């Protein structure tokens, strides 16, 4: 097989395709003497590695016992489909993680909304309590006002009853010494005298608290004072 044939074959495996991209170092790969031959068939490849790829082949060779073993292991791994399965698993896990992250974000948002609602409800409850307290105060004030109105009405009724009693007790006619007859209340007049006394006299005459030789007094009666 020629070098070109080998290159064509390698290109069919995606992971090793890059190995032939740059021709810098040349490795001859042959079976190691430490590995017993499983059959007589052997084939040699001429592969060109870049410095980085050469380092990789060295490192993997020391890990897997030989560069040949490392490359064969790699090829077998690719052939087994485990890499694709792992990639699919990783993709599935990433998707699962993203879904979980989205759910967590959504839950977090829901929680924030719930917190906001709770805060709003708390505020509303506070307002309601304040409103209820205000209503209770208003009701209390109203009840007190109604009680005061009832009290005032009762006092007014008492006063009116008292007034009627006094009105009924007031004299309507008084005897005039000058006229020598009873005269109606509409003809009475008042004059303040000493000691808080009020003289009620017959307005038809002058105010005469005392009589003279020619005239009688015009005072009908006294009001107020000590009565002496
Ligand atoms: Zn008179």
Image (tube, rainbow, N blue to C red):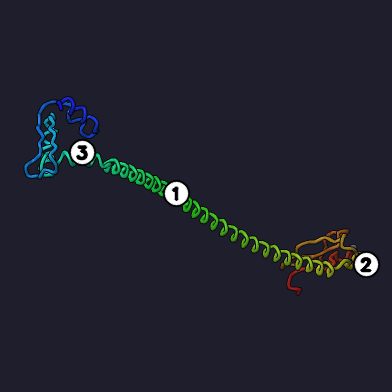
Of circles 1 and 3, the one toward us is 3
Q: In which quarter of the image is residue 208?
A: bottom right
Q: In which quarter of the image is the C terminus?
A: bottom right
Image quarter for ligand 1: bottom right
Task: Give percent across and percent down for residue 216.
Answer: 88, 66
Of circles 1 and 2, the one toward us is 1
State the residue at coordinates (13%, 25%).
23
- Report the disc number at residue 110: 1
Task: Give percent across and percent down for residue 133.
Answer: 56, 59
As drawn, 189 above or below 24: below
Mark 2 residue CB less than 8 A from any atom of ligand 1: yes
Q: In which quarter of the image is residue 184?
A: bottom right
Crowding at label 2, few (<14), some or many (≥20) Cα neighbours within 10 Å?
few
Q: Name the residue under label 3.
A: 75
**Foreground of the two, 169 or 52:** 52
Q: Dot 1: what SS?
A: helix
Q: Name the residue under label 2.
A: 181
Res. 136 visible in picture: yes
Marks 1/3 in contact by CB < 8 Å: the verdict is: no
Crowding at label 1, few (<14), some or many (≥20) Cα neighbours within 10 Å?
few
Q: Quadrant of residue 76?
A: top left
- Report the disc number at residue 145: none
Task: Give percent across and percent down for residue 30.
Answer: 10, 36
**Foreground of the two, 191 or 159:** 159
**Foreground of the two, 192 or 23:** 23
State the residue at coordinates (89%, 66%).
173
141 with respect to 86 (left or right): right
State the residue at coordinates (45%, 48%).
113
């Amino acid at each position: 097989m020629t070098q070109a044939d080998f290159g064509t074959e390698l290109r069919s495996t995606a992971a090793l395709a890059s190995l032939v991209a740059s021709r810098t170092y040349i490795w001859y790969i042959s079976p190691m003497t430490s590995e017993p031959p499983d059959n007589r068939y052997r084939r040699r490849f001429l592969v060109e590695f870049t410095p980085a790829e050469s380092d990789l082949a060295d490192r993997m060779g020391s890990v897997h016992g030989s560069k040949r073993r490392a490359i064969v292991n790699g090829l077998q791994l690719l052939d087994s489909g485990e890499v694709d399965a792992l990639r699919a698993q990783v993709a599935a896990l990433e998707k699962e993680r993203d879904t979980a992250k989205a759910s967590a974000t959504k839950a977090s948002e829901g929680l924030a909304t719930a917190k906001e609602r709770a805060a709003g409800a708390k505020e509303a409850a506070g307002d309601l309590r304040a409103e209820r307290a205000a209503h209770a105060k208003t009701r209390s004030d109203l009840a007190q006002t109604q009680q005061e109105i009832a009290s005032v009405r009762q006092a007014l009724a008492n006063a009116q009853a008292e007034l009627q009693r006094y009105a009924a007790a007031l004299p309507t006619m008084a005897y005039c010494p000058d006229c020598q007859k009873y005269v109606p209340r509409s003809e009475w007049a008042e004059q303040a005298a000493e000691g808080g006394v009020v003289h009620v006299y017959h307005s038809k005459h002058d105010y005469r608290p005392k009589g003279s030789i020619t005239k009688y007094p015009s005072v009908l009666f006294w009001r107020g004072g000590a009565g002496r």
